[in-house]
Amino acid sequence: MSPNGKPVVFGVARGFKRKAGLCLDYGKSRLRNGAPYHVVEPARTITSHEGMDFCRRAGTPVIAPLDGKIRFIEQDNASWGGVVGITSNFSLRPSPGKSKQRIFVEMVHIVPIQGLRKGQKVSAGQLVGHVQKANRPSIGDTPHVHFAVRRCNDWPTCHIDPNYFWRDGVGRISCHTPSKPLPNGRMVAPLPCK
């Protein structure tokens, strides 16, 4: 929230040099609860459906965007394919007076690698899966990873804009660079940058 009490929404500048395959949202215009998506402005792409989509060819590696532990794995849902969730090593306080909540990320429309298990520790940049083929109703015509950041399991109320957490600063999608440490509370894109 801004000092005047209005929600703050950060976008990712279009044409940013280190694109990780960010693509625009798909044809729907409203969330499940009927609320409209955030707009796509001329200069920036705004998170518009509780996460961000990264478009890449099926089979492209999907990496852990932060250090943490595997929270959940779904191998192959008939509607949305596979999912990997990772609980981070950091927490945030959603509002004054509330207790801190651990942040977790989820990557949807992927094929998790074999042998990945709940509770397993992972490091930023570690392979966790591959982009799923566009052969499920919720994936649409374009293979992509739906990337979301959450603070609890209640889907409508616990979404947090991923743009707050990039290693290189708010609104700057960060690529995984092994030689560049990942500060606590920061993350990188779930796909290797081109």
Image (cartoon, rainbow, N blue to C red):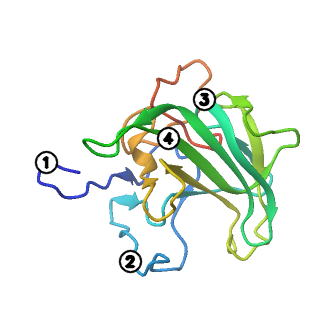
User: If you read the primary sequence from the N terminus, does the residue marked by circle 2 or circle 1 appear first?
Assistant: 1
Alpha-carbon distance for marks 2 and 3?
33 Å
Q: In the image, which is nearer the foreground, mark 2 or mark 4?
A: 4
Task: Check the image and report above or below for 123 versus 74.
Answer: above
> Relative to 88, is 38 on the left or the right?
left
Please name whichever residue, 171 or 7, is drawn nearer the observer in this view of the structure: 7
Determine if residue 75 is in view. Answer: yes
> Relative to 106, is 134 on the left or the right?
right
Q: Which residue matches tag 1?
A: 3
Identified by mark 2, the residue type is Ala
Identified by mark 4, the residue type is Ile
Alpha-carbon distance for marks 3 and 4?
11 Å
Tag of residue 35: 2
Q: Which residue matches tag 4?
A: 103
Across and down, in percent, residue 175 comes to: 55, 36
Q: Which residue matches tag 3?
A: 67
**SS for tag 1?**
loop
**SS for tag 4?**
strand
* Residue appearing at x 25%, y 57% in the figure: 7
Q: Quadrant of residue 33?
A: bottom left
Residue extending farthest to the left is 4
User: If you read the primary sequence from the N terminus, does the residue marked by circle 3 or circle 4 appear first?
Assistant: 3
Alpha-carbon distance for marks 2 and 1?
24 Å
**SS for tag 2?**
loop
User: If you read the primary sequence from the N terminus, does the residue marked by circle 1 or circle 4 appear first?
Assistant: 1
Alpha-carbon distance for marks 2 and 4?
24 Å
Across and down, in percent, residue 124 comes to: 62, 30
User: If you read the primary sequence from the N terminus, does the residue marked by circle 3 or circle 1 appear first?
Assistant: 1
Identified by mark 3, the residue type is Asp
- Please say if the residues under marks 2 and 1 sit with CB atoms less than 8 Å apart: no
Question: Number of marks in the image?
Answer: 4
- Please say if the residues under marks 3 and 1 sit with CB atoms less than 8 Å apart: no
